[in-house]
Amino acid sequence: MVARKALPHREREDTEQELMRKFLEKQNKIEKAFQGNANPETYLTAILYRMCCEVIRSDVKNWDHVRSDDPSYFFSRQNQAGSVENKLVISNESAYLKKILLLFDDESAKIVLFLKVLFGLTITETDLEDYEPEFRSKGIDEVLLGKQFKRNTDVYDALAEVVKLGEGSAVGGDAVRIWLNKRMDQTIKRLNGTMQRSHYDRKSFRILFDYTFSED
């Protein structure tokens, strides 16, 4: 924010100094809260961004230069004329999301596949194979590949059929919905971290997920 010259020149030095003061004041607490799950650079970038917002908020005359500390802001700028620091943050957040999903172990591929279906992203054979290597013989491809669902209820019913074919479990669409929403909320909680490294909600999480997995 400071680097991209969002602040007037006369205010920039004061903001940088106040940001440094706040960081040094809380450095021990910040370092102790770091759990090693994220890239240290990503962790510190998020912390410093939040601190910068707090500094600027304290000066009402400058607050109009800050759009939001909602992570969606970075993604909205991705398609605008080049912001290198934003692209770096997005790239780091995308990599961090993939690492968090891996923490679900055997459920990781299932979560990615089911969220891609829910969010209307293109499903590939690789997605299906990661979930179930025998997806063809079990007929899972016929349920998902090339399909478009108009309603969420149709999505969850289709995913319940996938669970039946792939895992041999007879579950209903509501059970799949509850399970997937729980996993989504757990992922968002891990993204935000115990120190609130960011402020993802379901809306901004979807933006990050779409960006991450539509690129694959």
Image (cartoon, rainbow, N blue to C red):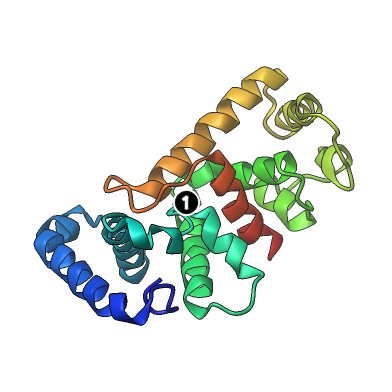
87 sits to left or right of 4: right
At label 1, counting other C-alpha atoms closer than 10 Å, the crowd grade (few under 14, some 14-19, many 20 or more) is some
Q: Residue at x 67, y 31 (%)?
A: 167
Q: Position of residue 89 (x, y in %)?
A: 46, 68
Considering depth in this image, is 208 or 26 the residue closer to the camera? 26
Image quarter of the C terminus: bottom right
Q: Quadrant of residue 36?
A: bottom left
Is 54 placed above or below 105 here?
below
Considering depth in this image, is 48 or 17 the residue closer to the camera? 17
Please state which amino acid type lies under the numbered disc 1. Asp
Q: Residue at x 35, y 67 (%)?
A: 45
Is 139 placed above or below 66 here?
above
Is 200 placed above or below 10 here?
above
Q: Residue at x 45, y 78 (%)?
A: 4
Q: Is residue 171 visible?
A: no
Q: Position of residue 78 (x, y in %)?
A: 61, 69
Image quarter of the N terminus: bottom left
15 sits to left or right of 129: left
Q: Position of residue 71 (x, y in %)?
A: 49, 55
Q: Is residue 135 visible?
A: yes
Considering depth in this image, is 166 or 215 the residue closer to the camera? 215
Q: Tag 1, which secondary structure?
A: loop
Q: Position of residue 18 (x, y in %)?
A: 19, 68
